Image (cartoon, rainbow, N blue to C red):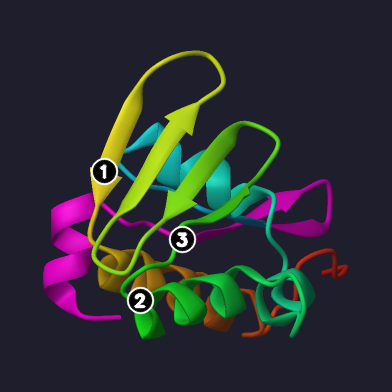
């Protein structure tokens, strides 16, 4: 992930030891990003039918796209040039679609890097 994206959104992915079990924790200075990523595992991100990267890539390829996606806490409208976040507790935020793609790819790569989420140490 590019340093400018990390700095701009305060991205901070961490491994936490929770009673001998690894938890992978997404972090950002935006609750929208943190809550979105927390609900997406690597298989969900890459799912060819309903994966978050699949939706983002489809939006980037089509200037007329408006794709709905999200998580338990965050709803998304994905357009070619921007993503509109709506948090279920209130509030909205917009970021470039290309930035969200890079963040999601970084999260997926972090999840797939040992130690794997849920592994015992």
Tag 3's secondary structure? loop
Span colored in magenta: 1-23
Q: Residue at x 39, y 79 (%)?
A: 62
Which residue is labeled 2 in the image?
102
Which residue is labeled 3 in the image?
13
The mark lying in front, picked from 3 and 2, is 2
The mark lying in front, picked from 1 and 2, is 1
Tell me if residue 109 comes above or below residue 21 in the rendering. Answer: below
Q: How far apart are marks 1 and 2 (CA)?
A: 15 Å
User: Which callout, 3 or 2, points at the residue further toward the start of the chain?
Assistant: 3
User: Which callout, 1 or 3, points at the residue further toward the start of the chain?
Assistant: 3
Q: Is residue 55 left or right of residue 100?
A: right
Q: In this view, does 118 lie to the left or right of 28?
A: right
Q: How far apart are marks 3 and 2 (CA)?
A: 14 Å
Find residue 38 and report its horizontal and vertical position in percent: 63, 49
Q: Which residue is drawn at 27% across and 58% down?
A: 82
Q: Residue at x 74, y 85 (%)?
A: 48
**Number of the label disc, if any, that sits on residue 94:** 1
Q: Residue at x 46, y 48 (%)?
A: 77
Tell me the crowding category of disc 3: few under 14, some 14 to 19, or many 20 or more residues within 10 angstroms, Cα based: some
Find residue 81 and report its horizontal and vertical position in percent: 24, 65
User: Which callout, 1 or 2, points at the residue further toward the start of the chain?
Assistant: 1
**Number of the label disc, if any, that sits on residue 111:** none
The mark lying in front, picked from 1 and 3, is 1
Q: Quadrant of residue 51?
A: bottom right
């Amino acid at each position: 992930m590019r340093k400018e994206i990390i700095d701009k959104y305060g991205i901070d992915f961490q491994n936490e030891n929770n009673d001998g079990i690894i938890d992978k924790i997404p972090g950002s200075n935006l609750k929208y990003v943190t809550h979105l990523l927390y609900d997406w595992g690597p298989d969900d991100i890459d799912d060819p039918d309903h994966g978050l990267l699949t939706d983002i890539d489809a939006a980037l390829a089509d200037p007329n796209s408006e794709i709905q996606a999200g998580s338990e806490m965050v709803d998304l409208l994905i357009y070619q040039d921007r993503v509109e976040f709506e948090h279920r507790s209130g509030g909205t935020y917009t970021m470039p679609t290309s930035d969200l793609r890079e963040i999601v790819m970084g999260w997926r790569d972090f999840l797939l890097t040992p130690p794997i989420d849920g592994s015992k140490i």
